[in-house]
Each structure stands twice: as C-alpha cells, then as structure tokens.
Image: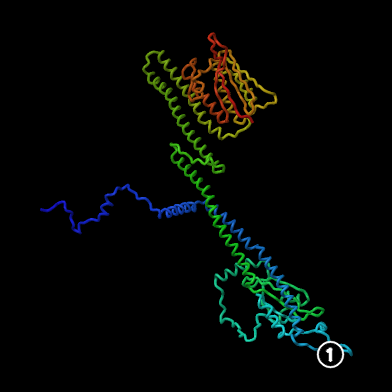
Amino acid sequence: MLDRTQPDLNPDTTEDTSQVLATEAPADHVEPTPRWRRPREWLSRAGQFLFTLSFSSLTRRIVSLNLAGLIALAASILYLSQFRAGLIDARAQSLLVQGEIIASAIAASATVETNTITVDPDRLLDLKPGESYGAPDEFSGLDFPINPERVAPVLRRLISPTKTRARIYDRDGVLILDSRSLFRRGDVIRFELPPPTDVKPGFLERTMIAIRTWLNRGDLPLYRELGPENGNGYQEVAQSLKGEKSSMVRINDRGEIIVSVAVPVERPRATIFGSLMLSTQGDDIDQMVTAERLAILKVFGVAVVVMMVLSLLLASTIAGPVRRLADGAERVRRRIKTRIEIPDFTRRRDEIGHLSGALRDMTDALYNRIEAIETFAADVSHELKNPLTSLRSAVETLPLAKTETSRHRLLEVIEHDVRRLDRLISDISDASRLDAELQRQDVAPVDVRRLLTTLTSVANETKLGHDVGVDVRFEGNRADTFSVPGHDSRLGQVISNLLTNAQSFSKSGGRVRIVCRRLKSEIEIVVEDDGPGIRPDALERVFERFYTDRPHQGFGQNSGLGLSISKQIIEAHRGRIWAENRPGPTDAHGDTRIAGARFVVRLPAT
C-alpha cells in the first residue's frame, strides 16, 4: 500500500520552504529597520530638506546676499591688506641698513687689502723732509676706483646668506658687479640658453599672473631689466650717485613685487666712486603675502561654511513658515465652503507672526462674511416668499370673486403685498450695498452736534405721520468736541432709524429725547421714548435681520431691517449699540414698571 501521508520527494516538485513561508506571511507585516540603516535615513531626510530649501527663491536670496557680502569683505581684505604695505616698508628699511653695511665694506675693500700695505708712488714724491707715510686713512682724499677682484669675494660672502640681488655701479652708472654672476673658485659656470621658440604660458598660469598683478599692481611702476651701461635708468641708482639713499617699489611682468634700494659707495670725507643697488627676488615678498592670503582664504572658507549653515537655518525659519502660510491660503481658495485653518505662528514676535495673525483674521472675516451672505440670502428668500405667496393666492382668487366687496378686499391685499415687496426690496438693496459703500468711502471727521441738531430740526418739521416731537441735549463742558471718524450720511441713517423707531412706539403728543455726552474716548448718544418698552427676551433679537415685534401695527408694515442695518453701520465704525428698558416708578406690588425703551450708541471719538 502507498502511504499518502509520505511527502513527495521529487526534486522537480519540491518547493523552497522559505518561499512558501514568504508567500504565507501576512501582507501587513513590516520588519523593523536595522540600526545600520538609520543614519542613512537621517542623511536622506536632511538631504531632502536641503533640496527643498534650495528650490526656495527666498532661501536662495538669503544665501546669495550673505555670500556676496562675505565675498566682498574677503576681496577687500585681500586687495587692501595693510600687511603687504607694512611688509614692503620693513623690507625696504632692512635693505637700506644692509646696503649701508655692504657699501662700507666695499669702500674699505676698494683701498685696503688684507696683509698688504698699499703705497702710492706719487704720494711718496710729494713728501717733504721729515714727513712720514701715514696710515691708509690719511689717503681718504684720494680717488680709488672699485676693484672687482677685491670687492667680489666680500660681496659674495655678504650676499650669499640673504635672498637679495646686489649690483655695483661705478660713478658713470656702468655695471661693475652683479651677484647673479658671482661664482666661487672651482664652480662650473652655466649660462641658460634662450629657448628655440617662445612658449607662451598656459591659461591657468596667465590667469594666476593676471590675478596677482591685479592684487599687487595698484599704482606701482613696472620693473624692467636695463643693460649694464644703463644704471642711471634706475631712479634710485641715479639718486645714490648724488649721495642720497633711495628706495623704489616696482612690479614685474609676472605680477611679483620688486623692492630695490641704492646707497652710495663712499668713504668718509671722500668723493662718491660708485653705487650699490640691492633688490629682492621676484617671489620673496610674494611668498609671504601669498601665505598671508592663504590664511585669509582659510578663514574665509570656514566663514562661508558657517554662513551657509546659519543662512539655511534662517531661511528655514522664514521660508518654511511662509510656504506653509501660502499653502494654507491656497487651500482656503480651493475649499471655500469648508473652514480651513491657517497655520498659527502668532507666538512668534516678528513679521511672520504678524502675517500669520493677519491671515487668520482675514480668513475668519472671509468665512464670517460668506456665512452672513448665505444667511442673508436665506432670510431674503424667506421674507420675499411670504408676500409673493399671498399675492399669488389673491391673484388666483380674484377671478373667482363673485361680489364687489370680495374683489375690493382682494385688491387691497394685492396692494398691501406690493407695497410690502417694494419696501422689502428697497431695504434689502440698501443692506446689500452697505458694506461696499462703507469700504469705498473715505473716513472723515463727523460733527455729531451739528448732525443731531439737523436731524432733530427735520424730524420736528416733517414728523412723517407721527405727532411726536424730538428734543436734543448735549451734556458736558462747552469746550468738549463731539466729533467721530466716519461717514456722516450713514451715521445720519442710524439716528434717523432710531428716531423713526422711537416715534412709532410713542403715543401721540409724546416726546423723544436725544442725549449726547462726551466720555473719555467715546461719544455716547442715547435715544429714549415713552413707549411700552421691549420684552426682556427680545432685547438682543431686535437687532436681528427681518425681526419685528409691533402688535399695535398691522402685519407687513415693517421690514425688520432698520435696526439690523443700524447695528451693521455702528460696528463698521468700530462702535457699539444696544437696547435697554428705561425704568419707571414701582407699582403696588413693588415691581418696577417700564417707562419706555432706550437705545445707546457709543462711537470712538477723534
């Protein structure tokens, strides 16, 4: 029998156990990241952050401007370095001291020879009886030419330890000795032959020469090699042959600084019989200046790295929040019907925090305005639908009326609804234009005293169907000014609405009182009447749009927008308006009666 529990060992059908386990593992299983991969992830995230910052124009501007200022500073230090000038002056002074010493030694070697007494035959013939031939110093007045064979060893010993070039000219400016041509006994004389063809320096070498020339040139003259008989062509040599020490600073065609000095070769109380010219080698001073500039460049490199890091950190605190604010504003633009929160950076005491607060306030005002528009549209449609429905029913019923009385009643309903629609449309149009007009008009000082006086006179003369007078009183000193910043026409509309409202609730023959007083920084206007007052639960609702509570008037006689528009105007002027009941005498039960309504308006004074 075949055991069916025995596994199939056919290699062709055998599956790898690891593959089976891998396929049977759950899909949501995630292996933990090894520790050796975590630094790579951190570096990757840092690289992504820097890559994101590098594409920010604000980041590029910050880094570029800081780097430009640092480059300008480094370039000015390299160009206007005082180290080079001080080094040149010190080098010139040391060459002058060295030249005086060497010139004295040359003058002594020209007339004195070691272990040898020099005797002048002509001097011996001129001696008188009893006179003796003195020391060599006694012959200081004699004119001895410079002997190259005597001077060369002395010059070679004095010049060899230094990196200077020495040249000796006779009194006619003819070159006698040049330290470049001095050689010791047994030395092999080598002469550099000119190249068969002039090989021009490469681009890199020409660039370095141009940079070095630009950095070193300034107003320095160009150094040129003159012939052996043109010593007077050097200004310092010509001055030294006149007995004056002189120094010059020049620059050669490779941009290297050459400092040269010339001192006269003479003995005390003797005539000048030559000139010693000492000059630096082409790369003597430049090596020291280059070392100094390399040190400056090293410091500059460290400063660049520090500046880049600090600039990126600064840009991350500016560009990052600005980008988040821009993204939030973009989301607000795309999703206008749902509230999107602008990132909050108001804790920062800088322009970014101010910008964040301003954007958040602007967004809240925008959403509030949208919600107000939606609510206003809903209220308008609701208020317009009622008279339209009544008007439609009356028009449909009019053909069915059989008596003249019924038709006359239906015509009155139609006329009433038309007047109500006209009043609603006028008030709605006024309310919808209010915000736009307040934004377009410029704010100007409004004389409240003159405004209230004018409105009171008009109300007393016209009365507009109300047999109710208006009194106005101003409290305070005569020197007090009753002026507020705003729009006189809209503030007049508020006072007119309050007066009309107070007159409509007052009894025939009553009085409406207006009191204006100056507070510390506000102007308060109080309008009082002797009407029934306002129900306590309606003190806030009277300012709602389309709200009206007039039991003594017929339905539809008021649109309910007057107080709402008045509140909107006062709030646009950064003021406040509220309603309250004026207390009267107490009744038999001890309860305080309501003597009338009172509306209080407070506006900031100028």
Q: Position of residue 314 (x, y in %)?
A: 54, 50
Instruction: Determine the image quadrant of residue 513.
Output: top right
Which residue in the rendered view is the most extreme toward the front?
Answer: 115
Q: Tell me which amino acid carries mark 1.
A: Leu
Q: Taking 129 as reference, is 92 left or right? A: left
Q: Where is residue 154 in the image (x, y as percent from the top left)?
A: 70, 81
| Number of numbered discs on residues | 1
Q: In this view, does 113 lie above or below 462?
A: below
Instruction: Determine the image quadrant of residue 598.
Output: top right
Look at 46% across and 24% down and name the residue there.
421
Which residue in the rendered view is the most extreme toward the top?
Answer: 588
Badge 1 marks a residue whose secondary structure is helix
Which residue in the rendered view is the most extreme toward the left?
Answer: 1
Q: Residues within 10 Å of mark 1 (few under 14, many from 20)?
A: few
Taking depth in this image into account, of 356 and 441 the one nearest to the observer is 356
Which residue in the rendered view is the most extreme toward the right?
Answer: 129
Instruction: Determine the image quadrant of residue 331.
Output: top left
Q: Where is residue 40 in the image (x, y as percent from the top left)?
A: 42, 55
Q: Taking 379 as reference, is 105 left or right? A: right
| Residue 211 visible in the current orientation | yes
Q: Is residue 316 above or below residue 444?
A: below
Taking depth in this image into account, of 526 and 489 the one nearest to the observer is 526
Q: Name the residue under label 1.
A: 124
Q: Taking 538 as reference, is 89 left or right? A: right
Q: Position of residue 450 (x, y in %)?
A: 65, 25
